[in-house]
Image (tube, coloured by chain):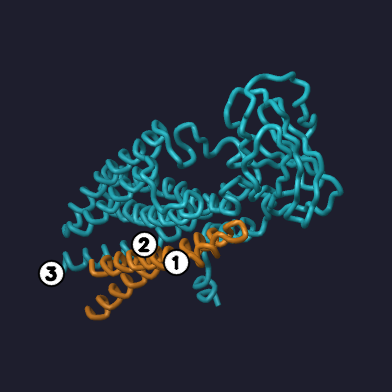
Chain colours: A orange, B cyan
């Protein structure tokens, strides 16, 4: 459950930071709009990648917990 | 040696998923867009004027031709042909138009589409690029404005279609749209396993069902985030009160409640039963929320309210060559993640059973 909270907070943080930085810096926006908005596609692919990595990390953490549990039993 | 081999062996479909996604990312980014018109100035004119329009093109080769014809298309049959063209660079060109005194329409403001007919780049269009103020309303003889060409040049190069506003972000089709398709496939599997669990009460089916749902939720959240990014650069806002957007948000919330439900019940038997039933209901709720209600209302999002997504020119054959593999690739990656989760849950369940019998 703690893990879930952490993930949720991380998501919200990334989200708000992103939105704030994008809105504060019009330069970033202009950059993302330049050359036919190709960097928007890059951002989308990066988000996809980060999402999958975060998911794998959560499975990793769960497995570590289980491993520790088994270790303690023995 | 045998153990080493088995250690690094991967099921064929996992490799296939990775290879397909590599193909989609590399191919989807490497193939250029068709030529198109980024912007024109001025955007307003009046009947009787001679207007010099400067055009900014995208992926165009204006310098490779001596003379390029452009047309201001007023309606299906009538067009004004350019008097001359003057290319400044490959992406910049001037056209002069003599707009006649009268136009064959009674509108006050006549929207005219700019068509550039180039032998090298093919024909491309900026819809409603120039608004002509109609000073003398009335019909004139048909012949004066019948200047649209009999035949447009075509560009047979292997390229993605150029769409206004979308520009390069049309490539997001392979990621954002395919994510939702993959999510739906995973959810179908999840429901099937939920039903099978309720029939057989075999816990392995519960592991599978819940794992499929978890990966599908990941895909749904990623789909919403990628959609928001895409919307920011095309609709100029992260979120609009659009039917499709709100309904998908609701369905994601329904599935988040599923996760909450599972974590809140400690009894394994009860947890599996309740979540299987909830999963089936959630899926039944998903279909009208995502597929029916948005189609009944006007929506900005493609695929709703007379706004086709998978038909017409929004998804042409070049896009299909990457879009369908992307769905398969993301689904296979989803299966892979599901499999890891299932294996984890089986282990956990074994430990749980061990505790039950030994305490």
Whether residue A11 can be seen here: yes
User: Mark 2 sits on what residue?
Assistant: B341
Viewer-closest of B57 and B314: B57
Select label 2 or label 1 by which is in front: 1
Q: Position of residue A44 (x, y in %)?
A: 50, 59
* Numbered tag placed on residue B359 in the rendering: 3
Q: Is residue B281 left or right of residue A25?
A: left
The residue carrying pointer 1 sits among few (fewer than 14), some (14 to 19) or many (20 or more) residues within 10 Å by Cα, namely: few
Could you tell me which residue is drawn at 74 percent across and 39 percent down?
A: B50
Mark 1 and mark 3 on one chain:
no
Select label 1 or label 3 by which is in front: 1
Q: Position of residue A34 (x, y in %)?
A: 59, 61
Q: Chain of mark 1?
A: A
Q: Chain of mark 3?
A: B
Location of residue A7 (image quadrant): bottom left
Location of residue B104 (image quadrant): top right
Mark 3 and mark 2 on one chain:
yes
CA gap, disc 1 to disc 3?
A: 42 Å
The residue carrying pointer 2 sits among few (fewer than 14), some (14 to 19) or many (20 or more) residues within 10 Å by Cα, namely: many
The residue carrying pointer 3 sits among few (fewer than 14), some (14 to 19) or many (20 or more) residues within 10 Å by Cα, namely: few
Q: Position of residue B30 (x, y in %)?
A: 66, 59
* Numbered tag placed on residue A50 in the rendering: 1
Viewer-closest of B208 and B326: B326
């Amino acid at each position: 459950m703690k893990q879930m909270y952490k993930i949720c907070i991380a998501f919200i943080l990334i989200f708000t930071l992103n939105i704030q930085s994008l809105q504060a810096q019009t330069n970033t926006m202009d950059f993302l709009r330049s050359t036919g908005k190709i960097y928007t596609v890059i951002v989308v692919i990066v988000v996809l990648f980060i999402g999958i990595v975060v998911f794998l990390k959560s499975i990793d953490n769960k497995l570590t917990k289980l491993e520790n549990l088994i270790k303690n039993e023995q | 040696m045998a153990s080493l081999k088995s250690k690094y062996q991967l099921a064929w479909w996992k490799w296939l998923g990775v290879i397909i996604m590599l193909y989609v990312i590399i191919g989807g980014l490497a193939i250029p867009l068709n030529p198109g018109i980024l912007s024109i100035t001025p955007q307003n004119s009046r009947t009787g004027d001679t207007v010099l329009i400067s055009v900014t093109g995208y992926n165009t080769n204006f310098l490779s031709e001596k003379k390029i014809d452009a047309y201001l298309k007023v309606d299906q049959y009538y067009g004004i042909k350019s008097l001359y063209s003057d290319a400044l660079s490959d992406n910049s060109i001037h056209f002069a138009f003599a707009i006649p005194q009268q136009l064959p329409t009674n509108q006050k403001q006549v929207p005219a589409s700019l068509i550039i007919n180039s032998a090298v780049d093919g024909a491309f269009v900026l819809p409603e690029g120039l608004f002509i103020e109609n000073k003398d309303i009335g019909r004139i003889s048909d012949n004066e404005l019948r200047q649209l060409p009999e035949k447009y040049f075509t560009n047979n190069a292997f390229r993605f279609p150029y769409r206004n506003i979308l520009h390069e972000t049309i490539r997001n089709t392979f990621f954002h749209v395919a994510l939702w398709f993959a999510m739906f496939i995973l959810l179908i599997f999840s429901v099937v396993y939920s039903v099978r669990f309720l029939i057989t009460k075999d816990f392995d089916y519960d592991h599978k069902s819940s794992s499929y749902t978890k990966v599908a939720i990941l895909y749904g959240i990623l789909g919403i985030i990628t959609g928001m990014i895409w919307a920011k650069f095309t609709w100029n806002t992260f979120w609009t009160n659009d039917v499709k957007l709100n309904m998908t948000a609701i369905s994601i919330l329904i599935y988040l409640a599923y996760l909450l439900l599972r974590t809140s019940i400690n009894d394994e038997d009860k947890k599996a039963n309740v979540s299987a039933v909830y999963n089936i209901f959630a899926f039944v709720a998903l279909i009208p929320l995502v597929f029916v209600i948005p189609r009944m209302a006007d929506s900005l999002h493609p695929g709703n309210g007379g706004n086709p997504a998978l038909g017409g020119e929004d998804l042409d054959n070049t896009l299909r060559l990457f879009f369908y593999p992307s769905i398969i690739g993301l689904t296979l990656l989803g299966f892979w993640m599901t499999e890891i989760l299932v294996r984890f849950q089986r282990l956990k369940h074994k430990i749980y059973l061990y505790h039950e019998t030994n305490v």
